[in-house]
Image (cartoon, rainbow, N blue to C red):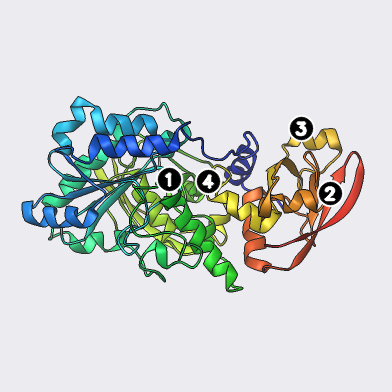
Amino acid sequence: MDLPRFLLAGLLAGTTAMSLPAATVKDREGAVRKDKAALENDARWIYGDFERGFAEAKRTGKPLLVVLRCVPCLACGGLDAEVLNEPALQPLLDRFVCVRVINANALDLARFQFDYDLSFSTLIFNGDGTLYGRYGSWAHQLDPEARETIGYRQALEGALAVHAGYPGNRDALAGKQGGDIPFRTPLEIPALAGKYQRDLAWGGEVLKSCVHCHQVGEAYRASVRDQGKPVPTNLIFPMPAATVVGLTLAPDHAAKVTAVAPDSPAAAAGFLAGDEITVFAGQPPISVADIAWALHRAPDAGSLKATVRRDGRDTALTLELPAGWRTRSDISRRVGTWSMRAMAFGGMVLTDLDDAARAQRGLPKEGLALLVKGIGQYNKHGLAKRSGFLKDDVIVGIDTWTARAGESEMIARLLQERKIGDTVNLTVLRGGERKILPLAMQ
């Protein structure tokens, strides 16, 4: 099978780095308590009480800004510090009612639908609950020292512009609102129910009482899988980056195109570098996270309408999404992927061998060749090790699947086509010898 260049590049890009669990501060418990001590009586920030924030937004007429922050995680630490302390940001923040939430226990999941794998996110609402937009940065997620706030400022200014036009622009915001949900709060999801309480245990082990945002996505997937149902693709590939359709967006703009991949859906639609996306799927984006949300809610195949500002004029474009477009997302760096690796591969971390490595091993370019880059040791993540798999094995067949595919795509296939308790046979190349090893799905 000949892959388009932009898809092949995406598959190869995932081979360059091994995904690791999210790095955390040394004293995680202390970090949470320090955050509360510093901010619970802060003049600007309402600490942990978003319902109070909605009430205050109604009273003042200001928009409501809710920061969701996983304090123990090092990721986004630089951005978080700047949002709290950067002098230039403070006058802008004064135009909002500001709420800081450090745990997901009591989140209203009808309102708070965002990229749960990020350790710093911001949602901006009207006091009546209407969502104006989302902010979340993978550039800051992958670089804890990144402190650039231009993109954040753009999102806040964009939200203020939306607020100024409300409620006249209510119809344009319809697509930004959360979709239907099976559970109202994280504590109703079976994987979390009975294990946590609504409030953090400040008088005890507070860290162990905290539901982290990434656990919400993990619990959603587990609830579907435990029912014996295929896991939906938008749960396996949540909040896709615009690169999956061939768009590279500037991190310091709301939605400015910096590059368009050749042979991609974006190229076919007519997007050009320099375009400023002003409408995407009927929605006015205030940040790249709004583009990701629109893609998250997009059909598995179909078209999305967009408007771009180009040379001072508005240009209408139509983005055609081919069948299977989501599966080209690279989810290897997402913390939520760890639980899916246990479900599908017994805790193995896999990476698609590049062409040079394939040539060294005498493997074809178009065939499956997933190197076991890492292997778990304990519990569900230790199943592959207990089943006889070793680091540096190369998987060249999974049941009858032998065509080239990345780890992300194969996780999706297994979570959609195999149930808990099913056994798959993996053909493994080890030291020039081929072995067939069975692996149970979890």
Pointer 2 or 3: first along the chain: 3
Q: Position of residue 108 (x, y in %)?
A: 31, 62
Q: Are marks 4 and 1 in contact (CB under 8 Å)?
A: no
From this view, report whether residue 51 is shown above or below residue 36. below
Q: Secondary structure at mark 4?
A: loop
Report how far apart the C-alphas of labels 3 and 1 lie in the structure. 45 Å
3D distance between C-alphas at marks 2 and 4: 26 Å
SS type, badge 2: strand
Q: Quadrant of residue 376?
A: top right
Q: Which residue is disc 3 drawn over?
A: 356
Residue under pointer 1: 207
Dot 2 corresponds to which residue? Answer: 428
Q: Identify residue type, mark 3.
A: Ala
Name the residue at 37% across, 29% down: 78
Picture coordinates of residue 218, whole percent (x, y):
51, 57
Tag shown at residue 147? none
Q: Amino acid at mark 2?
A: Val
Given the image, on which type of amino acid does mark 1 rest? Leu
Residue 153 visible (yes or no): no
Q: Which residue is mark 4?
A: 335
Given contact means CB atoms under 8 Å apart, are the residues at marks 3 and 4 in contact?
A: no
Pick the residue in front: 25 or 403: 25
Q: Earlier in the sequence, mark 2 or mark 4?
A: 4
> The C terminus appears in which quarter of the rendering?
bottom right
Contact (Cβ within 8 Å) of mark 3 with mark 1: no
